[in-house]
Amino acid sequence: MFGGLAFLLHSHMFCGIINEDLMVRVGPQQYEAALSQQHARPMDFTGRPLHGYVYVAPEGYQGTSVLKQWVQRGIDFVSTLPAKQSPGGKSRRAVPTR
């Protein structure tokens, strides 16, 4: 979609890597709080920032604990979204089979 590596949860993108930047989907409610973090900036690859998505420069995700915090922000947001529907009208959430 945007020339990077993306990670999905229930068919929703929640984070990824674009060049050296971490991209995190934080959602509209947490957008300003995320932007207030050091090394975070609006995600803008089209000339218009995507509200609810941020880029984090490498200095902002150095170390396992801070990287986990950013990834968890993405997971927390997409966990609130409804499951996407497949073309056949069925939910894309994984269902265990026997």
Image (cartoon, rainbow, N blue to C red):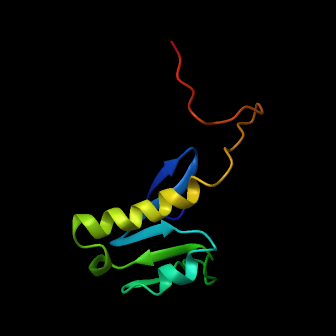
Q: Depth check: 57 or 27 in front?
A: 27
Q: Quadrant of residue 27?
A: bottom right
Question: Vertically, is 30 above or below 78?
Answer: below
Q: Which image quarter is the N terminus in?
A: bottom right
Q: Position of residue 96 (x, y in %)?
A: 52, 23
Q: Residue at 24% x, 73% y: name it.
A: 62
Q: Residue furthest left?
A: 63
Q: Residue at 77% x, 33% y: name it.
A: 89
Q: Residue at 54% x, 77% y: name it.
A: 45
Q: Position of residue 8 (x, y in %)?
A: 50, 50
Q: Residue furthest right?
A: 89
Query: Is 89 situated left or right of 30 in this image?
Result: right
Q: Position of residue 32 (x, y in %)?
A: 56, 83
Query: Is 40 situated left or right of 64 in this image?
Result: right
Question: Vertically, is 51 above or below 95?
Answer: below
Numbered disc total: 0
Can residue 73 be seen in this snapshot? Answer: yes
Query: Is 62 situated left or right of 11 in this image?
Result: left
